[in-house]
Image (tube, rainbow, N blue to C red):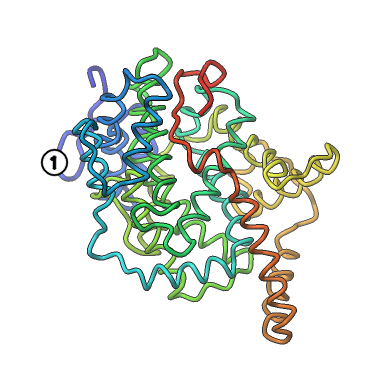
Amino acid sequence: MIGQPSLRVGSGEDLEVPTAYVAGYEAARQHDPELADAYVRNTMVGDPLADAVIRDLSALDPGELHQTLAQALDNPHAPQPDAPDSLLRFVEYSTTVPDWFDAGIARMASRAFLRNSDIVLAALVGGSIVEGFSTLISKSFRIRGRVTNSGVRRLKQNGMQLVEQYLPGGMEPGGDGWRLTLRVRLVHAQSRYLINQSDEWDHERLGEPISGAHMLLAGAAFSGRLMQHVVTLGGDFSDEEREAYIHVWRYTGLLIGIPEEILFHDFASACRAFEIGSMCEPPADLDAIIMANSIVNSAPVIIGVEEPAERRKMARVVTQASRELIGNELADSFMFPSRRRRVLPWMRIQHRARRIVRKALPGLGAKQDRARFDALMNFAGFEELRYSYRLPTALHDEQSSDW
């Protein structure tokens, strides 16, 4: 883009670096120049496949848009004679399962996830989502407005996607996890389209809104980094199950729009992508502070705590757990309060005790497993998100039709 600075990188190419990334990029190159170059290069890239769909359908009213997308994604193998070529390409790409994806490994991941679902969701809410909003992706969400509502919606969206992709068969073409992942991808594309039509985004400084680089960082946060948080919380994924979990997220990454050139392939590479991508990002600013606090304060709402005093009490616990997961430096930058009493040691004891109970008292363990599964289904029961392909219609959420 005109006016953007260029830095000479080790490969000899002229790489345009949005000004907000310059300092972090230079530091990241000291650790992994190839990955740092690829990450920053993709801060300039959106999602060509999904962006083309949104451009071609931009003239439709919300109802027509929902119907067009529903016909294509609810029946992906049926003929779509009236669909634009961009949507046909999008569906063809999304229904082509890569040769490396192994359904048996996915089933292993499902079993491990269901056994640890409450721990995984705690790691998601207290760790990975909050860390994701330390990046410039927070600016896209803050611009679109309704911060508290955005926190609730974001948690439900990410939580539902995580649950559905690990239920058996969820990521098969036409499955609930598959459809929900594509819905999230199209929401991102529509949001990017609306932001790019406005004058509220500084491309020279920030790159592309909801960029390919941010999709990589989000995928790495929800896979490799999340597994690190699960260990901290006392989860019991074996090494093989942990790799299986990443295997499913690798496929999810393709579907959600991570550019293939930077897609991670195992636990180590996912953690590395999170580390280097985070280094490239600028320090958390006011938008990151707003969104991170919105997330932790939305957690009680998600699980149905209604009484205000109880909500505040639970929000304090979530905030402290988040501080212990993400570290004091980042928590301080978010202005999270600090409590003397740590909460993660007690959570680890509870989770380890549960494993002992499962082995020693199988009947009681089975009862606990059923209760955990029921709670998981309640969490994933946001039906209007799961089956709607309505997209935001205005830059600012308060002016948008329901979606």
Q: Secondary structure at mark 1?
A: loop
Tell me which corner region of the image, top left, top right, bottom left or bottom right, holds residue 207: top left
Locate residue 377 relative to residue 249 in the image: left or right.
Answer: right
Image spot of residue 28 (x, y percent): 36, 46
Q: Residue at x 33, y 48 (%)?
A: 255
Locate residue 130 relative to residue 266 in the image: left or right.
Answer: right
Asked if one can make out residue 33 in the rendered structure from this viewpoint, the answer is no
Q: Residue at x 59, y 43 (%)?
A: 382
Residue at the bottom extreme? Answer: 360
Q: Is residue 88 above or below residue 33?
A: above
Q: Nearer the viewer, residue 6 or 49?
A: 49
Q: Is residue 353 above or below residue 284?
A: below
Residue at the top extreme? Answer: 199
Locate residue 41 relative to residue 19 in the image: left or right.
Answer: left
Image spot of residue 233 (x, y percent): 63, 64
Q: Residue at x 35, y 60 (%)?
A: 269
Locate residue 235 relative to residue 363 in the image: left or right.
Answer: left
Asked if one can make out residue 164 in the rendered structure from this viewpoint, the answer is yes
Q: Amino acid at mark 1?
A: Gly
Q: Residue at x 56, y 59 (%)?
A: 229
Q: Nearer the viewer, residue 70 or 395?
A: 70
Q: Which quarter of the rendering shows the N terminus? A: top left
Q: Dot 1 corresponds to which residue?
A: 12
Q: Is residue 42 above or below residue 345?
A: above
Q: Nearer the viewer, residue 198 or 361?
A: 361
